[in-house]
Amino acid sequence: MRGQRSLLLGPARLCLRLLLLLGYRRRRPPLLRGLVQRWRYGKVCLRSLLFNSFGGSDAAIDAAFEPIYWLVDNMIRWCGVGQTDIATVSICKKCIYPKPARTHHCSICNRCVLKMDHHCPWLNNCVGHYNHRYFFSFCFFMTLGCVYCSYGSWDLFREAYAAIETYHQTPPPTFSFRERVTHKSLVYLWFLCSSVALALGALTVWHAVLISRGETSIERLTNRKESCRLRAKGKVFRNHYNYGCLDNWKVFLGVDTGRHWLTRVLLPSSHLPHGNGMSWDPPPWVTAHSTSVMAV
């Protein structure tokens, strides 16, 4: 009986609610009706931003914070920051601060890095404008050191490896515990130096190629995409920071005169790189590019 009563009362309650709702809508004042329509229109717009196929929650958040970015940009200009002649490309949406050309935000360091190349986990730091030369010098000289150790210890490695091969012969060789440890340590160290020389040497060669082209690891990806996009349109991409192979190395190493190859490259030097990392005016001896550039 109770189940039949619920089946009969269910449609009745639904009809009663519909009648009350329709009556309430008829008695709704025009001002309130207009506010409700605008509220529903706003909900439709918000859902279109969140659930369309071209965007997501990030697009909706960026659209909502766009007035804040505009306000911060204008406030910075009014306060005089824009009068420092800093060539800014855009505003970092993480730092809410003007972002100069070739600057990228590091999600690990949680800050913008001038001329960012990459975040090195071995150094626990970003490689950028002020330490890129030190990073490359470290990789280059470490590779040379590992190659020198591997080549110089080749005879010791062969003797130690041949001794290890005789451990399981009959009768066994009369090697002491200290000699056995020495043999295994020599083999291990030789393989370690050779492995580091190969891995670090490949990394050094890759960075040397990037330096010769006048670009960083991040710019390599962006320039490649831009080159493919322009090639599809029948155009040629040009890197504004590429001054030629030799001039790129001079700018990177800070070589202004001939004697700087000795005092600034072969010998330890703490000189600063060219420029301040914000505006990219080439050195005066680079005649092929005499004007500043603002390419991303």
Image (cartoon, rainbow, N blue to C red):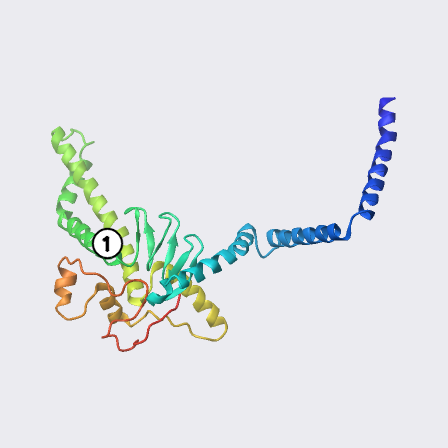
Residue 243, located in which quarter of the rendered image? bottom left
Q: Is residue 175 visible?
A: no
Q: Is residue 112 above or below residue 291?
A: above
Which one is nearer the viewer's eye here, 58 or 134?
A: 58
State left or right for residue 187 relative to residue 226.
Answer: left
- The residue that mark 1 highlights is 139
Which one is nearer the viewer's eye here, 229 or 48?
A: 48
**Rendered-image quadrant of the N terminus:** top right
Residue type indicated by callout 1: Cys
- Residue at point 64%, 55% (across, down): 45
- Residue at point 13%, 59% (across, down): 267
**Rendered-image quadrant of the C terminus:** bottom left
Q: Is residue 23 above or below residue 135?
A: above
Residue 119 drawn at (x, y percent): 33, 51
- Residue at point 86%, 38% (across, down): 15
Secondary element under disc 1, as helix, strand or loop, is: helix
Residue 33 drawn at (x, y percent): 75, 51
Residue 41, located in which quarter of the rendered image? bottom right
State left or right for residue 94 relative to residue 160.
Answer: right
